[in-house]
Every structure is written in structure tokens, then in C-alpha cells.
Image: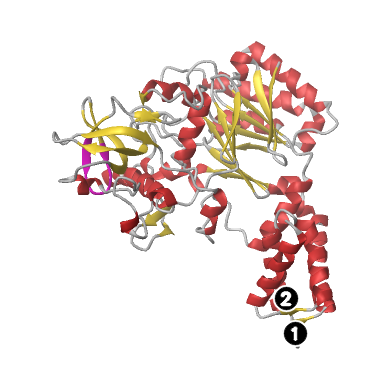
Amino acid sequence: MAVGATRKKVLRKFKLRGYILQTDALEEILSFLTQFEDAEDEAINVLLDEINKESLNSSVLDRDSVHRVISLLHEAESAVEASPSSSNRSHFRIVDSFIIPKFCYDPIKKTFYERTGKLPIHGEASSKAALYRDRFELLLQRLSRDPHFAKPAFDSEFNSSDSCEISPIQSLIGQTGRRWIMGVISQLEDGHFYLEDMTAAVPVNLSNAISLTSFFVENTVIVAEGELLPSGTFQVNTCGFPPLEARDESFSLLVGLDFFGCGAVPTEEMLRLSELEKKAVNDMFVIFSDIWLDDAETMERLAIVLNGYENEAVVPSLFVFMGNFCSRPCNLAFNAFSSLRSQFGKLGEMIGAHTRLMEQSQFLFIPGPEDAGPSTVLPRPALSKYLTEELQKHVPNAIFKSNPCRIKFYTQEIVFFRQDLLYKMRRSCLIPPSTEETSDPFEHLVATITHQSHLCPLPLTVQPIIWNYDHCLRLYPAPHTIVLGDRSEQKTFEYTGTTCFNTGSFSSDSTFAAYFPCTKKVELSAL
């Protein structure tokens, strides 16, 4: 930002707090802010908070008063950086899905509140209805802030046909002309689709609908433009997903609420972590999907990759191994669990043989859709202790988490999800996606999950989800990075500020990915 604009901003913020700055004090503050070009507002707020703690004789601040506070901030930062607790490993906060807090939206108070108490795995019938209601209300509150769908301030300035205001489905009765509605695509009768909101449901005709970039599947929330026909069917002309909202805008409305699961972080701490993140230029995550432990060729290729990183000048700070960990589905017909356990032990021996990796890297294991577990529902719990005991003897710092799981790297939020999502989305799609903007299926997939603010917006008949834990798959506020483990071709795509990439299948295609969180750079690799 230009110096003149920064100067005006500082004077205005200090004046709002009741302070008057002398010229030399202002110059001292401007010099301090040059260290935080990307976070000026946060730096000014932290400085003001610290000045408020000081015992001052006057509201007129001179250079010495400001310099004393800035020196204290620098000393605190140096002490934190020098402490062992600020090592790289302490900033890998890995979050299991089953400990993520659940927030529900109150449409009356227009605020989110946290649901307290333990959530049962086996929910009641009302839990299934709540799943759809919570998804719908989350997107509706986001849409209500979009100026394109807001009600005009002066109705006389607009014709009803020019307005994009969302109409409740119940209000369509007796109305003519074009209307905009928002609802969940439901199949209340076999072969007949409806749009359903909190007020009513209406049968829809999607045969002539013009769709936008996305996969439109049953259970997704869509915004549709059309008109109600005399037959009672809503003829859809154009349909799309609720518009996205900038991450910063979402956060400004969720102050003090921890949607990610790592705990709310005060502004001062966020500023400090942001600076540390910029300095973490050597941190790298190496991510694999489909590590078939019972396939000799796969294990040979994995050994080559680990040997390569062992001899690098700077080793990766995190290795992520996503399932499946067996070439055969571990279902009721699978009877080789003892063999799989010993194969995990051999993987532990392979990792343990690399001294530098053992000392400087962490190892995260995420189950795949066909790995051993209680069922195929999402979220999937971590791999059982029986399977991983032998591995942990060789790799004591191995971490086993759910699918999906989340990582907080300083201030950056990263979501990992192992699922063959693209194949299921394409099979379940009701309307062919538009090719006007892109014909790449992966880009359609990324647009779908980000606009729906959900990792798996498929019908529950295609991919079951634990009703009470559907919130664990939410993508709200939008994370910085989404890592997908999909058997389809490896791809990377940045969409509205979110970096999303698919690692590909290591066992099938010898592909994997390296991610540099400091720069959000992705390197798609293959042997």
C-alpha cells in the first residue's frame, strides 16, 4: 500500500481509539509497519492493543512511548522464535474429523452457535433431516450476503423481472413470470425430481436447463431461474450453485468461532504465526495415495522415492500416506488381516532405515475407502491399532488420523480427503456440465465441492455419511488448500483463492505430489 494511504489509515485508527500522534511517533509506527506489508491492519490493531495496556500520562503519543511498545513486541517475538516450542513440528496441528466442533446456524438470530454434548454415531431419523437442513441453511446465509441476490432497496427502481431476489418455493403458488429459487435437488418420487427448501417442494423440469461449470447431482443445493407452469412444474431455464464468499469475509462474521477444529486464535497470535509461516520456506509435504503394501512393485517404487528424499539437502517435513493400503478391498470376504499387519511392519522397517527422515520428518496415515474399518461411511476412523502396532515399533512418531482429516500449518488450513470422487460425481450427474468455461472434469469437481462448501455432496445412497458427523466434511470457511486422493489423472487447479490438487494413484500410475505450504506451490511428480 502507498505510504500516504498507510499514514492516513494509522492516523484514523489511532484517532478512533482516542490517541493523537506526534510526527516522530507516526514515523516510528510507519517504520514498524514496513515489516508487515501483507498484514498492516492486524499489525496496527496489535500495536493499539499493547498501547492500551500501557500507563500513559497523556493521549498525545510521542516517539518514546511508541518505541517502548514496539520494542516489547520485538522482544516477545524473538523469545518465541528462540523457544523450542516454536519448532516446525509444533505447528503441524493435525485434526481428526471426530473432534471437529459442530456449528449450526440460527436463521432467527442470524448467528452460528456450537452444538454441545457428545454426538452419537447412530443418529435418530431427525438427524438425517438435520443433515440436509444444516447444509441448506449454511449456503442460504452465505447467499443472503451476495449483492446480486439481495432485495432491491427501492422496488420502484427495478422491475420484478430484473431482480434476482430469491423467492421461497411456497410463494410460487399463484405467481407468474420469471422467478429465482434456491433448493435441494430431491427425488421424492422415482424418476421425478423436486427442488425443496424450508417452506415447500416443487417438481422441476431440468431437460432444457442451461447449467454452469459444476456437477449437478441429487442432494446438491442449486439456485434456479425459471417460471412455474400451469401444470405446477417449475421450468428451469438456468441453474447454478450459490455464489462463493471470500474467506476473509466469512471469517469477519465468525469471530471467536473455531470451525476448523484447532481452537480460536487471537489476532496477535495470528500475526506472529503469519510471520513465521513466511519464513518456513524449506517446509514441504510429500503426499501419496494408494500404497498397496501387498504389491512388491509398489514397495520397490516407494523405497526409491524415500531414498531420493533421504539424500536431499533439505528433507520433507511431512509425509502423508493415504490408502488404500491393500490391492484388494478389505471387506467381509477379506481374511488376511494378519498378513496386512505384518506388511505394515515391513513399511515401518523401510521408513526406519532412513535416518534423516526419521529424525526430521513426520508420517501421517489416512485410510482409504476400501481399507479395513467398521464400514464404508464417511468420515472413516483412523486405521485400527491392531494393523499399525508393528509399524509404530519402527516409526514411533507415526500419526494415524481419520479420512478426511485437516492440518493447520501456522495460519494455513489444509484438508486431506481420500475418495474416488470424480468417478462417482460423473456417474451421478443429472445435467451435463457446461463446457463453455472448461471441459476439464477435475475443474468441474473443484467448482462443485467449493460452491457446495462440502467435500462429498453426493446422494447418501451413493456415498453414505454418518448423519451426525456431516459437518466434518464441510468446507466453510473455504480452506487454503484441498488435497484429494483420487484414482483419476493427477491435476492441480486454483479456484477463487483455494488451491486444489489430486495426487493420482501411486500404485497404478507411480504418481505423487509435493506441496510447499509457504508458497502454496504444487509439484506433481511421477517415477
Vertical relation: 424 (above or below) 186: above
Residue plotted at (18% across, 45% down): 175
Vertical relation: 119 (above or below) 397: below
Residue plotted at (30% across, 50% down): 159
* Quarter the C terminus occupies: top right
Residue plotted at (18% across, 35% down): 229
At label 2, counting other C-alpha atoms closer than 10 Å, the crowd grade (few under 14, some 14-19, many 20 or more) is some
Residue plotted at (34% across, 42% down): 122
Residue 367, image quadrant: top right
Q: Is residue 418 magenta?
A: no
Drawn side of residue 500 relative to residue 28, left or right: left
Marks 1 and 2 close (CB-CB < 8 Å): yes
Range of magenta residues: 195-203
Give x and y (percent) for residue 233: 19, 34
Drawn side of residue 139 relative to residue 308, left or right: left
* Quarter the N terminus occupies: bottom right
**Labelled disc at residue 51:** 2
Q: Assign a secondary structure to mark 1.
A: loop
Q: Amino acid at mark 1?
A: Leu
Q: Assign a secondary structure to mark 2.
A: helix
Residue 180, image quadrant: top left
Drawn side of residue 339 relative to residue 89, left or right: left
Give x and y (percent) for residue 482: 57, 36
Drawn side of residue 346 relative to residue 189, left or right: right
**Labelled disc at residue 56:** 1
Give x and y (percent) for residue 275: 75, 53
